[in-house]
Image (spheres, helix red, strand yellow):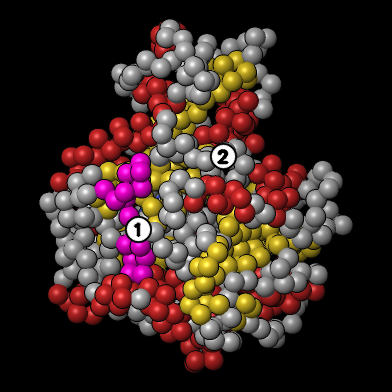
């Protein structure tokens, strides 16, 4: 199915564009200080060099940032678009690059990870220690029959074993597929089945807001029905809670990885060898398994991490707050910081546990210098008030990053003033699961930053904003965000479905990658992201599909039909609002049915997908061809006057809905 950008959702995009109109005259500009610019690791020269010869620029980064077992012969093979090959003929091992080589280079004693558990426990790993742990895990997985090309499903909390597991897979050439711990057993099962995973790595549970929270039962439920491909489940003991045990499948981490040999030799894998699959929501009900490969992905994540965060690995303490269940936790927790030999912080819990100053306490404790987080967190901290961060010493911070959705200018200013002492550069980075690494972002030592705008493509990246016909829009106008040239960390496809890859990303505009986002260029040519133009929502920086939640609602016996929209929400950016028609025999029991349906969505997809609001309505607004007009429902959900309803097949529907909501 191709993405619909001509119908109701595009109109919603336009409305959003109008709302952003006044922001496009942003006059505030924050050039880097002379001192920051003078010491920056990357200068404006990179733009010029990349413009001259893009593949050559990336080949230079690949050779300078990574150690190859076998050098590549060709930077880019684009002879069969949209299927790209980067660093053709090269052989490389991701885990060796993240670990062993730093130890060989005398950096074994540098701290790789400072781990902070939610209950207050902490541990750290030097590069030497982390290397040993990954070698043990690699040996253990191999002894369980996992070999090159096999898929490993990972369902873990934010603990060091997550990074160890991913790197151990990469080391032996197994393909990891992380499923976010907030997803349900059903979601886990469908991802295990789609990837035909041989091994699952999980934990008994984790902690959430001071209480133990289980994970293993979801794995048990996912594997209850027969027909799966899983041969073993390795279980990390994290919170010690009682769990059911399946003798046929389950093994404790400490009995397998814990007892494995500490020596393991990494061999190079082909540059295009699959590194991981990560499922993400698209416009249909079925999540897409986004496939990333090795050489190109490592090159762009490492380059961007160094350039965009101005990384000085000897002195910086980097903290990316993303969970490893999302792409940010892959690229900027698991891979890039370790490839670059950085020291990073990893935190298991929520920002308010046990108190609302927890993050700032962590920044103070470890002397974090670079913080990378999402606008939804920043808005939450704004709501809690500046007194909380003001109570901590945040002077170590020298650079702040944002990702996941547009950061509104007030939140940007607050972030800079309150967290960044009115002096740290802020990098607003646009990218996607599919792009693998950052694509549009200022460079902190070069770009004069502008609150609310991601501004300019990274050196070596060709993005554009085009109109319906695929023509570039002039400055001051809006359109669709596209990527014109292949980039090293680009997805290589959708697992098991090459046609869907072509159809979803490459069919809307000839020869260009269509990102699914609306965007504008301001008078200076800077890019502003305006949100999705398809049926994908962004809830707290997490991608969810309206169709997926609608399918979950309709699978409940009481529901006849459902329509879901993402409504603007002050804290989470968007919130899920569902309109449901109950079946004739189902009684509207008010709060009871609403609660039951929320829980049902939680069970089908995961707690993050639970609608904030469910409205029981008698009808849904549809066009004559039967397409639900979500734009009108969005007006209702956001409390606006309902827009143009002239194409409705039944003009009375909106008043019926208004009437039922009044009741
Ligand atoms: O709509 C854009 C939004 O998040 C989408 C990608 O989501 P996901 O694949 O989950 O990856 C999120 C983390 C990289 C994009 O299509 N998005 C991401 N970053 C930004 C953003 N929107 C505006 N500004 C950003 N900085």
Residue picked out by circle 1? 463
**Picture layout, residue 321 above or below residue 552:** below
Residue picked out by circle 2? 1
In which quadrant of the rendered view does residue 429 lie? Answer: bottom left
Q: Which mark is on residue 277? A: none
Q: Secondary structure at mark 1?
A: strand
Q: Residue at x 70, y 62 (%)?
A: 152
**Picture layout, residue 571 above or below residue 89:** above
> Does the closest atom of ligand 1 sit within 8 Å of the Cβ of label 2?
no
Percent position (x, y) of residue 454? 29, 55
Mark sitting earlier along the chain (2/1): 2
Q: Secondary structure at mark 2?
A: loop
Of 142 and 624, nearer the camera is 624
Q: Residue at x 56, y 16 (%)?
A: 581
**Picture layout, residue 642 above or below residue 663:** below
Magenta-tinted stretch: 457-473
């Amino acid at each position: 199915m191709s993405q619909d950008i001509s119908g109701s959702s595009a109109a919603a995009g336009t409305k959003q564009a109008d709302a952003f109109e006044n922001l496009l005259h942003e006059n505030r500009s924050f050039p880097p200080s002379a001192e920051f610019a003078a010491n920056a690791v990357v200068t404006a020269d990179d733009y010029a060099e990349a413009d001259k010869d893009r593949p050559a620029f990336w080949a230079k980064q690949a050779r300078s940032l990574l150690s190859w077992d076998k050098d590549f012969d060709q930077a880019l093979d684009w002879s069969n678009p949209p299927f790209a090959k980067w660093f053709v003929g090269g052989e490389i091992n991701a885990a060796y690059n993240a670990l062993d080589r730093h130890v060989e280079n005398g950096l074994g004693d540098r701290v790789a990870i400072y781990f902070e558990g939610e209950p207050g426990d902490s541990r750290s790993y030097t590069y030497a220690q982390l290397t040993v742990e990954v070698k043990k895990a690699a040996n253990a997985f191999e002894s369980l029959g996992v070999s090159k090309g096999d898929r490993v499903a990972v369902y873990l909390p934010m603990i060091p074993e997550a990074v160890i597991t991913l790197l151990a897979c990469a080391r032996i050439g197994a393909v990891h597929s992380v499923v976010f711990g907030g997803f349900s057993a059903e979601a886990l099962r469908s991802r295990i089945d789609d990837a035909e995973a041989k091994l699952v790595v999980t934990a008994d549970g984790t902690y959430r807001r001071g209480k133990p929270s289980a994970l293993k039962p979801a794995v048990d439920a996912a594997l209850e029905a027969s027909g799966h491909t899983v041969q073993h489940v390795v279980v990390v003991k994290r919170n010690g809670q009682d769990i059911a045990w399946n003798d046929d499948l389950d093994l404790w981490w400490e009995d397998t990885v814990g007892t494995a040999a500490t020596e393991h030799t990494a061999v190079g894998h082909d540059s295009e060898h699959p590194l991981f699959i990560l499922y993400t929501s698209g416009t249909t009900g079925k999540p897409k398994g986004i496939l990333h490969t090795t050489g190109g992905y490592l090159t762009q994540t490492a380059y961007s991490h160094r350039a965009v965060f101005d990384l000085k690995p000897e002195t910086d303490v980097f903290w990316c707050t993303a969970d490893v269940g999302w792409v940010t936790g892959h690229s900027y927790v698991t891979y890039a910081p370790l490839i670059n030999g950085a020291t990073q912080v990893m935190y298991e819990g929520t920002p308010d546990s046990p108190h609302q100053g927890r993050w700032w306490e962590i920044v103070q404790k470890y002397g974090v210098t670079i913080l990378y987080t999402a606008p939804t967190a920043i808005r939450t901290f704004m709501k809690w008030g500046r007194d909380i961060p003001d109570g901590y010493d945040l002077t170590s911070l020298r650079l702040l990053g944002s990702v996941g959705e547009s950061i509104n200018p007030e939140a940007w200013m607050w972030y800079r003033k309150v967290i960044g002492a009115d002096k740290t550069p802020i990098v607003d980075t646009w990218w996607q699961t599919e792009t693998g690494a950052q694509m549009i972002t200022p460079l902190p030592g070069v770009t004069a930053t502008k609150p609310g705008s991601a501004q300019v493509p990274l050196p070596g990246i060709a993005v554009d904003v085009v109109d319906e016909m695929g023509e570039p829009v002039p400055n001051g106008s809006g359109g669709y965000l596209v990527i014109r040239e292949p980039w090293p960390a680009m997805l290589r496809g959708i697992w098991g479905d090459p046609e869907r890859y072509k159809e979803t990303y490459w069919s809307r505009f000839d020869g260009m990658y269509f990102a699914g986002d609306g965007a504008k260029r301001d008078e200076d040519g800077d890019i502003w992201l305006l949100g999705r133009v398809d049926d994908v929502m962004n809830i707290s920086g997490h991608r969810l599909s309206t169709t997926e939640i609608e399918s979950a609602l309709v699978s409940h016996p009481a529901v006849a039909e459902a329509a879901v929209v993402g409504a603007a929400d002050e804290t989470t950016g968007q919130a899920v609002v569902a309109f449901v028609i109950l079946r004739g025999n189902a009684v509207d029991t008010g709060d009871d049915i609403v609660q039951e349906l929320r829980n049902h969505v939680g069970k089908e997809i995961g707690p993050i997908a639970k609608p904030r609001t469910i409205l029981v309505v008698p009808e849904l607004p549809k066009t004559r061809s039967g397409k639900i007009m979500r734009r009108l429902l969005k007006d209702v959900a956001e409390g606006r006057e309902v827009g143009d309803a002239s194409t409705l097949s039944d003009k009375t529907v909106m008043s019926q809905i208004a009437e039922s909501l009044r009741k």
